[in-house]
Image: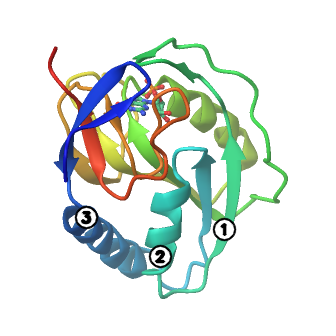
Amino acid sequence: MATIQLHDKKFVPYISEKEIDEAIASIAERINRDFEGKKPVFMGVLNGSFMFVSDLMKKITIDCELSFVKLASYHGTESTGMVNALIGLNDELTDRHVVILEDIVDTGKTLEYLLEILKTHDTASLSVVTLLLKPDVFKKKYPLQYVGKNIPNKFVVGYGLDYNELGRNLREIYQLADE
Ligand code: 5GP
């Protein structure tokens, strides 16, 4: 794996395919155990989560449903904190075990917004899975039940994550190179 360039920025290899796979396997193992017989509704948050959701679902062995929602909020390499409307929430979620699937949690604002909406739906339970978490930035009070990997406060791309729409197709995760 070599350094890559996306738009005006350079990125260096950071998390390998193997490491991603291992993190997902460990999340899947816990979910398969915790939600056995509960027929959870997985809710992938687009666009960034598409690759993670796809790989995670291949390792889920229990009965489950899957849908996607979208809330665009991000431009460039810094969170604007601006959250737009939620698209795609059509399913009946009353008394269901809802499991949100996120690619990355940074400040947690995006997720907070989604959780606020879902809390009005009388779900049986509400849990959060995120492949990546920036614990130095995340200061919210709500719990994140399943975290694949804690990472430092540096911008990452690849494996579904973009820098101004480039980089989503990369199989590994890359980190913004130091200037
Ligand atoms: P938050 O609301 O937690 O600050 O930001 C969450 C959203 O910002 C994520 O769903 C993701 O779209 C975007 N984001 C946060 N950190 C990064 C990052 O390091 N790289 C990329 N590509 N997107 C990020």
**Measured Cα–Cα span from mark 3 to mark 2:** 18 Å
Q: Which residue in the structure is indicated by mark 1?
A: 66
The disc placed on residue 27 is: none
Q: Nearer the viewer, residue 150 or 160?
A: 160
Q: Position of residue 161 (x, y in %)?
A: 45, 42
- Total labels: the figure holds 3
Q: Which residue in the structure is indicated by mark 3?
A: 23
Split into quadrants, the picture shows ligand 1 in the one at top left
Amino acid tagged 3 = Ala
Amino acid tagged 2 = Phe
Q: Which residue in the structure is indicated by mark 2?
A: 35
Task: Please state if 149 lies on the left or on the right of 145 as rendered.
Answer: left
Q: Nearer the viewer, residue 85 or 5?
A: 5
Q: Nearer the viewer, residue 138 or 58?
A: 58
Mark 2 packing: few (<14 Cα in 10 Å), some, or many (20+)? some
Mark 1 packing: few (<14 Cα in 10 Å), some, or many (20+)? some
Q: What residue lies at 52% left-to-right and 51% top-to-bottom? A: 49
> On screen, 19 above or below 73?
below
**Label 2 close to label 1 by CB (< 8 Å):** no
Of pointers 2 and 1, the one earlier in the residue sequence = 2
Q: What residue lies at 40% left-to-right and 72% top-to-bottom? A: 31
Q: Position of residue 89 (x, y in %)?
A: 79, 47
Amino acid tagged 1 = Leu
Of pointers 3 and 1, the one earlier in the residue sequence = 3
- In the structure shown, which secondary structural element does the residue marked by tag 1 occupy? strand
